[in-house]
Image: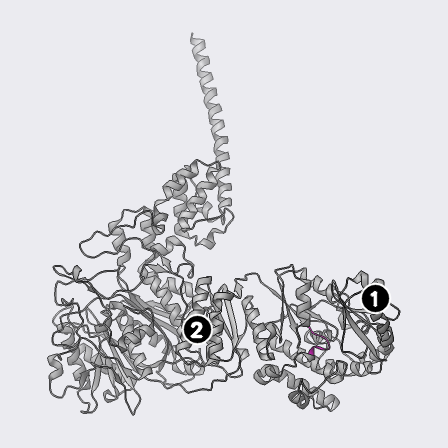
Amino acid sequence: MCADAENNLDVAIIGMSARLPKASNVEEFWQNILQGKDCITRDKSKDKLNYVGAYGKLDNIECFDADFFDFNKREAMNLDPQQRFMFEGIYEALEDAGYNSDKYDGKVGLYSTYDEQLYIWNYLMRQKGDWYLNYHLAEINLGGTFSTRIAYKFNFQGPCTMSKYACASSLAAIHQAYQGLLNYECDMAVAGGVCIEPQQDGCVSLDTTISRSGYTKAFDEEADGLVKASGMGVIILKRLEDAVKDHDNIIAILKGTNVNNDGNRKVGFSAPSVQGQEEVISDALAIADIESSEVGYFETHGTGTVLGDSVELRALKNVFQENNEDEKVYIGSVKSNIGHTSTASGVINVIKASLMLKEKMMPPSINFKKPNSELLEEGCPVVVNDRLRKWESNKTRIAGTSSFGMGGANAIAILSEYEQEPHENTLKKELFVVSGKTEDALKNNCLKLAEYLEKKDVNLEDMAYTLQVGRGNLEKKYYAVSDNKNDLIEKLKMIDKKGPTSNGEKAKKKIAFAFSGSGSHKYSIGKELYESNNIFKREMDKCFDIIKTISGQDLKEYYKNYDFEKDDLSDEHVTGMLITFIVGYSLAKLWNEIGVKPDIIIGHSLGEYIGACIAGIFTLETAIKIIIKRTELFGTLPEGRMLAVAAPKEKIEELLTEGVTIGAENGSKRFLVTGLISDIENFENVLKENKLSYSKLPVVRAGHCSVVNKISDDFRQVLKEVKFEKSRISIVSTLTGNILKNNEMSTIDYWIDQMCSPVKFYDAIEETALQNDIIFIEIGSSNQLTELIRKIILSNKSISAISSLKELKAEDSREGFLNAVGKLYSKNIEIDWDKLYNKKPYRISLPTYQFDRKVFWRYKPYFVGEKNEVLSSDTEEVSIINEEKESVEKSLKCDNITEKVLKDIFKDIFGVDEISIYDDIYEFGFDSLSVALVTSKIETALGKKISMKEIYSITTISELIEIIDNKEAEYNTFENEEVKEEKDTIKNINDIFDEIE
């Protein structure tokens, strides 16, 4: 963190999330307020004396994706829904910003707030649960751990604070986040708040605070109070200069914030103060360096209470009284749409104002018919915006937001619009990756993206990049390669038929680079990748320059103009050999730079030279010189041929004729035979007679046979000039079929033998496959080796093979390469996504994660006058509370009593259906509170006293069983000694009585 910009107080809002009445996300919220929608749920049948059946309800407050955040069932049941909503809301806001906390290197600060934890207290006051349940309810919801629990799960390492400032709490949290960024306490800030009450049908109305009509009529003459609501909002903040540099999606700019308190400058503790509000607004404008005349809109606290509205209007009038007649400030209150979300209301105001600045629209403040008398005064500088209007302006749009709380809490934020620079949509093929914790979540993520694309025009490069760097790397994966919207929509929808491209590969895979040999250039020479990837182009150009220096040949121009349909490039021609080499070399360097590095290297014929170069055995310049000289020497050999024969080795050896030998062993029934023309022609007749299938290779020289011995002396002279180094990477030789252990490849003899001997590719793959969990990547233009490897390792599911440029029958080399990257992504290989792009794309707002939620709720919804009941025991959610006694009693009837009882105890603690005695209990969330519970339950169920120290010493139930069994043995020994002593005593007493008698 370094402060390069001097005096810069601007902070960017780059992501948002919200769950509000009639809106499950920010987009739905925005559409609701644009349409002037009333989102309050009303039920006149609930209206009673001093009770109004109107409330801003949230959908599905009882639901939570506990598995996603690694909460067990009991923890999820006990966790206050406010925390649950914040977990999901923060994740959504980060994704909206194009970030995932696991992939972000900077420090993230968390500044949050919540309302009273009525879910917990309502339960505790109405339920006589066991001591552990009640204690755990309180422990997991301790107010001081609200933010720290979130920070722990998200790995936030910046400041982690709680703001408790009445209804101004979430705007005060934003103020703290703003200050934290400017003080360089963090690089990114998460700020927001939540207010969720166990779902109500309405509110008690005993005074003028709660609306008797059930409508929030902010600044209307007939305003009669507020309507309560539940809600959650989160925003993501970064210093503006950082957000611009990082190509973030900047929604709006936070120009300045301020908080203060009224003190006692008012009629009573709960009353607002004109002076306090006026000062906090004026100071905020001064901090932001904004004149009052520059403000075009102010999102007010606007609760619709008689006193509150009047005081707020007077304060606003005082602040803007110097404005000219044509500089009126529009005001509004989102509470007229959704109700008063208490601690969350401040961040909701900021979200609304940010969207207004971005979209240049002013939604109407509804339920406004007759202006408050304060608005009717002559020269009043503020006007309620009671209709949808475009925000026309010939200057930078500025908005203010306010949030006030009981006791004199005042908070203000001043925002301005930000004009994102337009950038070009490249329209080239891109890789789109999607993942989910479950298959349903993955499917819903894909379908949501498809639905989004059907409605929006999106820069596909930005979309691909955002999905790659701004989403979690979860178990279930899917990918698609596309260059147009309609094709991508169809491919995303194919998730229904195709299913995941990965079901959660967890094993650490080793990477084996398998370098193609001569002839692979006939399939592709990587031109599309050369034209679209700077790393590949850089390495290719480096090779071209070396070739030009060594031979004078301008291979670069030949390469750029090469036409597959017109040009016929012979395998043995030096140009063909060089192109094969430099494509393979450049691909290997590209893979390395995007984070895919080989643990093992294998090369087929010419491919071993590329592999040796990548392993550091000789330099790139040296390798190119060797290839040129070697190819020239091959050109001096008599003409020969090679055949591919499909038959067992024994059969081929039995039929071999004079002058014909096996040149390559590519599989158990895949061999290349080689020899001079006349010898090969004779052998063809033998193959025909024996009805064995074969094919001719398009070569004019015999390779990897005794014919090549004729040039071995000359080639030895070439190799004497080479400075060999030790290999930096493990190599499996296709000369020996084994792993090289003594740097054999760093010798002249190795390369002489390699040129004249058969290629033992089959043996090399078999040797490599012994290690299991291997991914072979063919480094070259073809998929020939890929197909050979797949057939060799067919039965080994832990091994796979991927072609760098021809994966999934790709139309061009860029598509093939991206398919290969997608395959590796599906196999959980980490990719440095930035290296796929020549220019850094932008992070954009896309649909966020579709959580796979389930019900976790302890009691029925209620309203005033009804008893708040615990859910009946036949529901899954509460069964974990009521089953303990029954399960223990059932266990006692089993043969292995200790094991059964302990398993039931731990299943109950963790809220799981199954657990093995060998499972690591800490992976289920075992903690200090669980330790106390285990000792108590064991003593109750088994009558055994186990110390907490002993519990801390174990990691599995089996270890605990051993401790208990040992105690049982000690107890039996002690008991036997005690019985013997007692018998001896009785005998002695009897003896005494005998003597008396």
Q: Is residue 229 left or right of residue 468?
A: left
The image's colour scheme reads: one colour
Instruction: Residue at 70%, 76% (x, y): give it.
Output: 610
Specify few, some or many for label 2: CA neighbours under 10 Å numbering under 14, 14-19, or 20 or more: many
- Foreground residue among 261 and 425: 425
Measure how far apart labels 1 and 2 are at the Cα level: 59 Å
- Horizontal and vertical percent position of residue 573: 76, 83
- Foreground residue among 637 and 747: 637
Amino acid type at circle 1 is: Glu
- Foreground residue among 423 and 657: 657
Q: Earlier in the sequence, mark 1 or mark 2?
A: 2
> Residue tagged by mark 2?
450
Give the vertical position of 875 relative to 839 (above or below): above
Q: Is residue 942 left or right of residue 706?
A: left
> Residue tagged by mark 1?
689
Query: What label sits on residue 573 in the rendered view?
Result: none
Find numbered disc 2 in the image and state the secondary structure of the residue it sits on. Answer: helix
Instruction: Residue at 51%, 34% (x, y): give it.
Output: 969
Q: Over which residues does the magenta segment extend?
A: 515-520
Find numbered disc 1 in the image and state the secondary structure of the residue it sits on. Answer: helix
Magenta segment, principal secondary structure? loop
Residue 318 visible within the image: yes
- Foreground residue among 598 and 875: 875
The quarter in which the N terminus is drawn is bottom left
- Horizontal and vertical percent position of residue 462: 46, 79
- Horizontal and vertical percent position of residue 184: 39, 76
Amino acid type at circle 2 is: Ala
Within the magenta stretch, is there residue 413? no
- Horizontal and vertical percent position of residue 132: 34, 48
Q: Residue 763's quadrant in the figure?
A: bottom right
Residue 186 visible within the image: no
